[in-house]
Image (cartoon, rainbow, N blue to C red):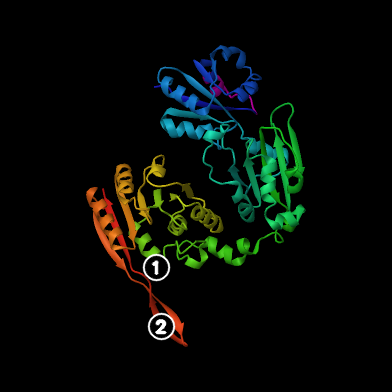
Amino acid sequence: MNKIHVIGIGFRPLEKPAKDIVLQSEAVLVNNRLLDVFKKYDEYDIVKDRIIMHGSVYETLDYIADNYKDQKITLLAAGDPMFFGIGRLVVERFGKDDVEVFPDLSSLQVAFSKIRETSSGAYFISFHGGPDPAKRRRLEYELKDLPGLLGQYQKIGILTDKVNNPAVIAAEVLKRSAFRDQPSALTIYVCEKIGYDDERITEGTAEEIARGSFEHPNVVIIIKNKELRAQIRDDKEQSAVSAQLSATTFGIREEEIKHSKGMITKDEVRAVTLHKLRLPRTGVFWDIGAGSGSVSIEAAGICPELKVTAIEKNSERAENIQANRIKFNIQNVEIIRGDAPDALKDLPAPDRVFIGGSGGNMGTIMNAVAERMNSGIIVINAATIDTLNEAVKSLENHKFEIEISEVSISRSKMINRKRHMSALNPIFIVKGERG
């Protein structure tokens, strides 16, 4: 079977293995912008009659799917295809065994060299949502997360697009008072059209970059100036307490987690819930009806290689999850804003599932989960007898072995200088396991 070859271009001549593949290809796929880059390569004149351009990434992937088994196909990509590039989409769709990648340098790698700064210790993020406003991809981080990330990292490299452009990024940075009030605390570099004849590098403060206009494509590098590092730390985000919190993996307290209207799994219940889940070191964990994200955050801290997805339909609660993820410096939690079961359709199959809230859709959610989960553990927390009965019935319908625990908690409080115990509402913890 033919392999799909994804070859990065932009900064260096093709090495011999990649060159031979391009010359032997029956179809060379390239987008309009990269075509101008490829025209400068010696191989262009030889294969120009075999070049195919599509209007979108998805049309390109569909073409590959229809033809790669019978045709030698090369897909040209910008820089390193596996660095926030199309390589990830190709591998996800066709599998690692059918794909071979030949990387060029990444644009951010080149950019750091251009500004004569080491990329060691830098944190890289992508704000590139895609060219089609109607089909912009879901990003790991949003613009509003940037000030918090700058509280954690000395250097940040950013892939931009026309919507999330350097001026917009700099304006978002200025929303944080520490950077707005001390303009010299940060240096921002905008590297435009790297590798093109009209390449340009601009250095400035956040305020200066926010007023600027820049050619696309470009990348942004933000560096906190060392001599002012201590001055720009936000008390809440970078205090000794926050440093201690980010190192905590188990035992996070309710008051440390941002939540609204009591929408949080109580500490003692969360401890039992995590124990019942028997979290694997690696795999996929869905937290459905995540609320504040307390279970997701703690699970991700315990198992940093576990892929955790927090699904929450309420926008305020989803924002709380994002704030908690940044506060506790958790990298392996993805937040999905949507209503289950519809929000589950495109997620990778789970090994563990926690249902903290079903919104009255327990049956349909369980149908969707059971269909995707071949084996594993589901834990459902129920505050009422009705929810308990619905959870048990749903698990039984899908042939899960069931275990039920009731957790009754009383906490001490002082009344007239004496310590009394005050009971919280009991919670039923239902565990279902199969496989």
In front here: 290 or 96? 290
Residue drawn at x 69%, y 31% is 193
Residue drawn at x 41%, y 42% is 347
Query: For the magenta stretch, what is the residue range?
Result: 11-21
- Per the image, the residue denoted by label 1 is 268
Q: Taking 3 as reference, is 116 left or right? A: right
Along the polypeptide, which appears first: circle 1 or circle 2? 1
Q: Is residue 46 visible?
A: yes
* Image depth: mark 1 or mark 2 in front: 2
In the rendered image, residue 194, in percent from the top left (x then y), is placed at: 69, 32
Query: In which image quadrant can residue 196 be found?
Result: top right
Q: Residues within 10 Å of mark 2 (few under 14, many from 20)?
A: few
Query: Separation of disc 1 and disc 2 at Cα?
Result: 18 Å
- Per the image, the residue denoted by label 2 is 420
In front here: 297 or 135? 135
In the image, residue 426 lies in the stretch drawn in magenta: no
In the image, residue 19 lies in the stretch drawn in magenta: yes
| Residue type pointed to by label 1 | Glu
Q: Taking 9 as reference, is 332 left or right? A: left
In the rendered image, residue 202, in percent from the top left (x then y), is placed at: 76, 39
User: Could you tell me if the residues under marks 1 and 2 are in contact, i.e. CB atoms within 8 Å?
Assistant: no
- The residue most toward the bottom is 417
Residue drawn at x 70%, y 42% is 167
Residue drawn at x 50%, y 17% is 27
In the rendered image, residue 397, in percent from the top left (x then y), is placed at: 23, 49
| Residue type pointed to by label 2 | His
